[in-house]
Image (cartoon, coloured by chain):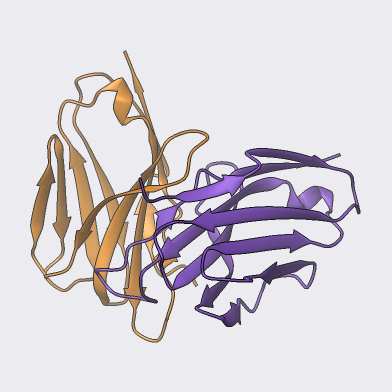
Chain colours: A orange, B purple
C-alpha cells in the first residue's frame, strides 16, 4: 500500500509558469518533509511542515500542510530552469519508525 | 562543512561479482540509512542502523548486506549483483530515528552498473 500519493508524476512546463504538486494520504502524519533531487545528486531537504494548516514559504516555493495532516502541497511561482528536479514528499506515520516517501514528481522547466 | 560522503560516485561491476559501496558522515548522527533508487523513482529503503542496531526491511533481498563498524562509516555489500541491482544507491543520515527535527541528510549517491 502506497501511503503517500504524489501527483502529477511528471510535469513539463515553460519558464515563468506556475505549478502545484500534491502529496496525499489516507493516513495522518506527524510531519511532512519535502525534498528536491537534482539529476545525479542526492535529495536535499526543502522544508518540514508540522502543524495542520501550516504554510511555509521558501522564496518562490510555498508549502502547505492540510488541516487534518493527511496532505500537503507545493506551489512554485514563476518557475525557472533551476527548479528542474524530482520533488519528493516524505513523512512519518503512526506505526512506522522510518520515513515513508511518495513516488515523486519529476519537474522539467524549459527556458 | 559537515556532510555525507559516498564513494565511489560510479561503480561498474560484473554480474555475480561482489561489490562494496561506502558511506561516511561527519554529522555525528545516530542513524544511517541505505536506499536504492531506480530511474526517477522514489528512494526505496533497504536497511538502517540506529547506532549499532541493524534494521532490515522485510523485502530487502538477502543479497544485500550492511556493516557499520563505527559511527562515521557504513558499508553496503552486494554479494552477487544481478542486472536488476543496477541503480543509484543513496546513503543518508538523521540525528534521531524519527521526528520533524530529524530530516534525512543524503549523500550524492553511487551509481552502480552491472555488466
Q: Nearer the viewer, residue B102 or A24?
A: B102
Q: Quadrant of the C terminus of chain A?
A: top left
Q: Residue at x 57, y 59 (%)?
A: B35
Q: Is residue A63 above or below residue A59?
A: below
Outermost residue, top side: A111
Q: Residue furthest bottom?
A: A95
Q: Where residue A61 appears, x then y in whole percent?
A: 17, 40
- Residue A12 image offset from top left, x and y in percent: 37, 27
Q: Quadrant of residue B34?
A: bottom right
- In this rendering, position of residue B64 left or right of residue A15: right
Query: Image quadrant of residue A79?
Result: top left
Q: Residue at x 20, y 24 (%)?
A: A17
Residue depicted at 36% across the width and 69% down the height:
B95
Expressed as whole percent of the image width and height from the top left, the position of residue B103 reads 33, 62
For the residue pair A71 and B114, the one nearer the viewer reads as B114
Residue A45, x across and y down, in percent: 31, 51
B2 relative to B57, above or below: above
Say which quarter of the image contains residue B104: bottom left
Q: Nearer the viewer, residue B99 or A11?
A: B99
Lateral position of residue A46 relative to residue A43, left or right: left
Q: Nearer the viewer, residue B48 or A1?
A: B48
Left or right, B43 with reference to A11: right
Is B76 situated left or right of A2 in this image?
right
Numbered label tally:
0
Amino acid at each position: 500500500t502506497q501511503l503517500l500519493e504524489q501527483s502529477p508524476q511528471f510535469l513539463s512546463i515553460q519558464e515563468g509558469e506556475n505549478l502545484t504538486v500534491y502529496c496525499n494520504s489516507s493516513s495522518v502524519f506527524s510531519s511532512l518533509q519535502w525534498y528536491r533531487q537534482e539529476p545525479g545528486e542526492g535529495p536535499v531537504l526543502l522544508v518540514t511542515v508540522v502543524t495542520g494548516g501550516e504554510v511555509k514559504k521558501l522564496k518562490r516555493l510555498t508549502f502547505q500542510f492540510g488541516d487534518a495532516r493527511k496532505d500537503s502541497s507545493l506551489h512554485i511561482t514563476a518557475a525557472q530552469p533551476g527548479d528542474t528536479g524530482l520533488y519528493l514528499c516524505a513523512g512519518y506515520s503512526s506505526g512506522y519508525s522510518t520515513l515513508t516517501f511518495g513516488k515523486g514528481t519529476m519537474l522539467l522547466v524549459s527556458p | 562543512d559537515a556532510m555525507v560522503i559516498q564513494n565511489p560516485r560510479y561503480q561498474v561491476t560484473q554480474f555475480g561479482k561482489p561489490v562494496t559501496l561506502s558511506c561516511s558522515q561527519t554529522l555525528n548522527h545516530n542513524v544511517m540509512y541505505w536506499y536504492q533508487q531506480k530511474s526517477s523513482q522514489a528512494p526505496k529503503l533497504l536497511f538502517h542502523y540506529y547506532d549499532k542496531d541493524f534494521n532490515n526491511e522485510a523485502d530487502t533481498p538477502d543479497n544485500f548486506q550492511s556493516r557499520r563498524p563505527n559511527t562515521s562509516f557504513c558499508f553496503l555489500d552486494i554479494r552477487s549483483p544481478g542486472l536488476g541491482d543496477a541503480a543509484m544507491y543513496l546513503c543518508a543520515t538523521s540525528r534521531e530515528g524519527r521526528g520533524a527535527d530529524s530530516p534525512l541528510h543524503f549523500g550524492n549517491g553511487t551509481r552502480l552498473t552491472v555488466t
